[in-house]
Image (cartoon, rainbow, N blue to C red):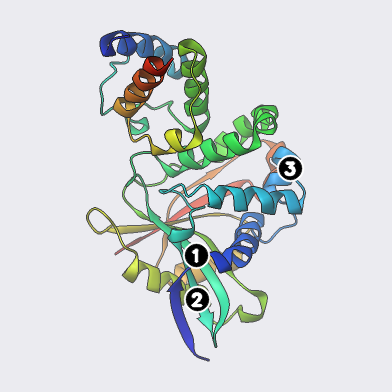
Amino acid sequence: MNITFRKAKKTDLDFITEGIILAEMSGSEILPYTALFGLDLDETRALILEALDEEIEGQEWYLPNFTILEADGQPAACLSAWVEGECGMGSGILKAQAMAWLLGEKWTQAGSKLEMLKSMQLPRLQLALQLECIYTKNEFRGKGMASKLIEYCIEHTATTSQKPTIAEIQLLGSNEAAFRSYTKCGFLIREQISSEQKEILTLLAHNTRLSLIKTL
Amino acid sequence: METSEIRLQLSNIFNSVFKCGNIEITDDLTAEKIEKWDSLTHLTMIAAVESHFGIRFKLRELTGMKNTGDLIELILEKKQAV
């Protein structure tokens, strides 16, 4: 199989949107945007496409942050990489601003659920290389695609300041296959947080979030 | 409206939203320096600033902000344009 890497283009938007949705579902049937804002799948796709179209740097939903792995000329996996805080604001604030802006009243109505999600937040390490929205198409799973993409992005992500010394991946506890894959790449658990609130499982696939890091 | 006046009013808003005593509004103040400044309290702070100063930010203006100095500049620009 011939493996190549390239930066994402506008023609990859549908592939990336599917990748973001499946990465957010984290191997479960729960789509957080349905549970939080009442969005169906098409509305969630539209929200992600609108957010990507706003071109907000410094967070995961920014097209130039995406790298595509192609297998025999076909997009097989994608990943978003950026340096946390390099743009000034943290990625969580930037993404929340975009979502609040795009969702309007639906964001406001989700206030109590969003407050509940705070118990599952892990602050991202400042100036660490963040790897998010890691997605491999079904037919290419089990072939080490995500590992190859992670290694490529660690080597090739452009930065405007000094090169990061740490890479970080955050994931939910439900994603055991992804956890095994990342630990095989040399990532170790930095921190984990669990919520005791039962309702959290109506919003997310698991009540534990992990931060994994790798020294570069 | 003077920058010093905006700083004073922002200090009141920040103290009320982030609930952490007397916050000194410096140009390089960012979320990393205030414990309770997270994605949700940030949006509460922005809504409070808009309401207090009678202005409305565009998404691009908000996402381009790097620190409190940028916020002060934006408020000044918008107040001068009124």
Q: Quadrant of the C terminus of chain B?
A: top left
Label whose residue precedes the other's in the sequence (1 or 2) = 2
Q: Which residue is mark 2?
A: A69
First of labels 2, 3 by sequence position: 3
Mark 2: amino acid: Leu
- Residue A101: x %, y % from top left: 58, 34
Q: Are marks 1 and 3 on the same chain?
A: yes
Q: Amino acid at mark 1?
A: Leu
Label 3 resides on the chain identified as A
Q: Percent position (x, y) of residue B2?
A: 28, 10
**Amino acid marked by disc 3:** Ala
Q: Is A206 placed above or below B57 here?
A: below
> Which residue lies at the image location 64% right of the left edge and 58% below the top edge?
A26
Name which residue lies at 44% across and 74% down.
A6
Disc 3 target residue: A35
User: Residue A74's x, y, as percent?
Assistant: 58, 81
Q: Chain of mark 1?
A: A
